[in-house]
Amino acid sequence: MAWVVGLTGGIGSGKTTVADRFAAKGIDIVDADVIAREVVKPGSQGLDAIVARFGALALNHDGSLARAWLRERVFSQPDDKQWLDDLLHPLIRTRMIQACADAQSQYCLLVVPLLVENNLMTLADRILVVDVDPATQITRTLARDQVSQQQVQAILAAQASRQQRLDVADDVIDNTHTEAELDRQVDALHHTYLTLATQANA
Ligand code: ATP
């Protein structure tokens, strides 16, 4: 069982950028977003259950999940949102635990954008928050994605606050500066985590 660092942060804070740095050091990455897609891929128990409830409307022509349709549906029907969360959250949680258990590196990085919102802190031995101010989150997301400022602001408002994340953090990466400065922080944390993982596994 690998020692687990849970990585979280708001939209556009730099989670992927940080995770890539740890991956380059040979650390196994478990990505909640990837797992969330796997549990509803064609042939999965998750997709079968969704089709049993909503019918073929929930499917694209190629048999994959019609995400946009489902998003609209659960947005307008709170009961359906609850049902979907009750279905998918345990599937995702179980897979994340399994993937961390299978990790081969000295510790593993579990990337969970909604760690705080979904109260998944207990999955990690240590919590690392990537922190930037909201203005930087918005600027970087607008530079990266084809979205409006209003859309980014709506997502920010729906996520946990900066303070809520900082409240659960064991470690914080301040990603307001250059990527070179980010590298320095990742290097220092990597050494700390190697020491802590060695102690935990002794
Ligand atoms: P999301 O939750 O929206 O998927 P994220 O937290 O994974 O986002 P990234 O995609 O890693 O965030 O970073 C957001 C954008 O900001 C990317 O285009 C990335 O290249 C850029 N970025 C990250 N860190 C820095 C930095 N220190 N300086 C400048 N740009 C940065």
Image: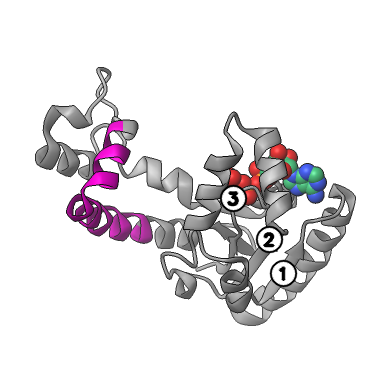
Instruction: Name the residue nearer the viewer: 49 or 24.
Output: 49
Residue on which disc 2 sits:
130
Q: Is residue 197 left or right of residue 122?
A: right
For residue 11, the mark is: 3
Q: Is residue 8 left or right of residue 80?
A: right
Q: Of label 2 and label 3, which has the lower sequence position?
A: 3
Could you tell me the amino acid type at mark 1? Val
Image position, residue 168 (x, y; %): 58, 77
Whether tag 2 and tag 1 are in contact, CB under 8 A, the answer is yes
For the stretch drawn in magenta, the main secondary structure is helix
Whether tag 2 and tag 3 are in contact, CB under 8 A, the answer is no
User: Which quadrant of the figure has residue 163?
Assistant: bottom right
Could you tell me the amino acid type at mark 3? Ile
Image position, residue 57 (x, y; %): 17, 28
State the SS at label 1: strand
Magenta span of residues: 69-94
Q: Of label 3 and label 1, which has the lower sequence position?
A: 3
Residue at 43% across, 58% down? 96
Quadrant including the C terminus = bottom right
Image position, residue 2 (x, y; %): 55, 67
